[in-house]
Image: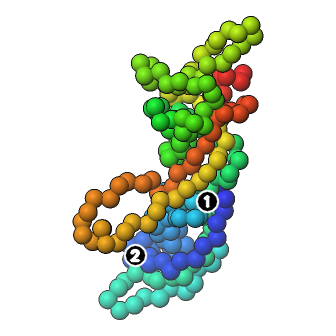
Amino acid sequence: MFVLVKMSEKVLVKPGDLRLGLGQGVSAEINRIYANKVIPSVGFCVALHSLESVSDAFIYANNGGAHVATVFGLVVLRPFVDEIILGTVAESSERGIRVSLDFFDDVWIPAANLRQPARFDAEGGHWLWSYSGAGDTQNDLPIYQDETIRLKVVAVGYAPPQDPRSVSEGLPQPYHPPMTVTGRVNGDGLGPTSWWR
């Protein structure tokens, strides 16, 4: 789920951040630039892991900051297809279930990827799996909000780039999460952890 990605960047360390020392200033600036952001085809950047190299600082006229070239490692959330992950049910609707990983909330289980037969209980606001037990007994197993759920990743997608013409013309843009993880719970051992105790 987490990978270490090696990157390089030219960073401007502001004069006020130099009091921390060049290494600390560079680390703070890299975290400011990348932490909690999605890089398409890379993943969701969590935090700086390590500084591998920092060049000599250059200070240009009319700018008191230190310009440095750096090579660094970032901790990145990038689930792979068929990976099993644990999350918390954030919300349920007729379309499916949104799952939170505490620091990343764009995990989606479409209704078609739930154990079948499933139905949405509009009054309770949750999904039910209608499990047929021994002797044709029907058991409704619920998926409640804030419950721990185990899912299998089926896809990781990134938002399409915005059309620059519509942005410059001020036209409204539909919101697309920068990164979405699509999962399924229609297999043995998947679904709320309370089902499998």
Q: What type is the residue that disc 1 sits on?
A: Val
Residue 183 picture location, percent across and down: 61, 43
Residue 194 seen in the current view: yes
Sooner in the amino-acid sequence: mark 2 or mark 1? 2
Which residue does the numbered mark 1 point to in the structure image? 75
Q: Residues within 10 Å of mark 1 (few under 14, many from 20)?
A: some
Residue 59 picture location, percent across and down: 43, 88
**Image quadrant in which the C terminus is located:** top right
Tell whether 4 sits left or right of 31.
right
Instruction: Name which residue lies at 35% across and 55% down.
Output: 174
Vertically, is 71 above or below 176? below
| Residue sitting farthest toward the left | 170
What secondary structure is found at the residue carrying circle 2?
Answer: loop
Which residue does the numbered mark 2 point to in the structure image? 14
Vertically, is 50 above or below 146? below
* Front position in the image: 164 or 99: 164
Instruction: Name which residue lies at 30% across and 68% down.
Output: 166
Instruction: Name which residue lies at 66% across and 27% down.
Output: 193
What secondary structure is found at the residue carrying circle 1?
Answer: strand
Vertically, is 143 above or below 175? above
Label 2 – label 1 distance at C-alpha: 24 Å
